[in-house]
Every structure is written in C-alpha cells, then in structure tokens.
Image (cartoon, helix red, strand yellow):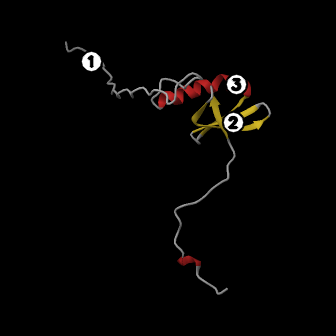
Amino acid sequence: MPDHDCSTLPEFQVSFPGPFTHHDVVVNGWRVPYLQAHVTAEDRVMLIIDRRLATELSVEEAERVVPFVADAIAVAMGYGAHPDKDTPRPPPRAPYPRPERVMDVSLLPADD
C-alpha cells in the first residue's frame, strides 16, 4: 500500500460514542422522559436526569423519589402530572402559562 498524507482528509462532523448501558425508568407503566438509571449494586441505583445531573439512591429511596421526579418532569413539559395506569394515550397536555415579569416595589421615604 503506498504512503499517503492523512492530513488532507476532511474532519468529520459525525461521531459514534458508546456503547452505553442504562435502564429506562418506568412509573405506572409509563417511561419517564429525560430520566435514566444505572444499577450500581443490588440495592442501589444511580438516577441521571437529562444526562447531566446524577444521584445515587437506595431502591427504597428511589421508590419514594422517582414518582415526584416523574411528576416534575411532566409538569415542566406542559402536562398536569406523570400519567397513571388509567391515563389515555396520548395524555392531555396543559397549556403553558404565560411568563410574567415580577417587579419589586420599594417604599421611598416621604419628603418632609
């Protein structure tokens, strides 16, 4: 094979990192978006939100915390709550509230 100059090759924009192993998180039969889990021990699980924030919990702690996190994610996405087993598909979406600017009001001393 003849020698060639690799510096003339274009720089690629696409890469394929991985493979990654994670578990989906499911509450009441519905997958929780933006939430992944890694089982770290028999009774420990690491929860990762949006591939950025992580915490390690016991399985019992996760049983209490994950439904709350699922509701918070659903509300942030514009839903009323994370669906339960009886929720129709697709779940109804609540309208986004209009952002409102809050202004501080300060009392000024009265001129005598």
SS for callout 3? helix
> Which residue is rendered at x = 60% and y = 83% of the image?
4
Residue 19, relative to residue 105: is it above or below?
below
Between discs 1 and 2, the one toward the N terminus: 2
Residue tagged 1: 108
Q: Amino acid at mark 2?
A: Met
* Residue farthest toward the left in the current orientation of the protein: 112
Residue tagged 3: 61
**Mark 3 and mark 2: span between their CA atoms?**
11 Å
Quarter-of-image position of residue 108: top left
Q: Residues within 10 Å of mark 3 (few under 14, many from 20)?
A: few
**Mark 3 and mark 1: span between their CA atoms?**
50 Å
SS for callout 2? strand
Q: Quadrant of the C terminus?
A: top left
Residue tagged 2: 46
Image coordinates of residue 25 in percent, x first then y, are 64, 34
Between marks 1 and 2 in the image, the one whose residue lies nearer the viewer:
2
> Which residue is rendered at x = 53% and y = 66% of the image?
12
* Residue farthest toward the bottom in the current orientation of the protein: 2
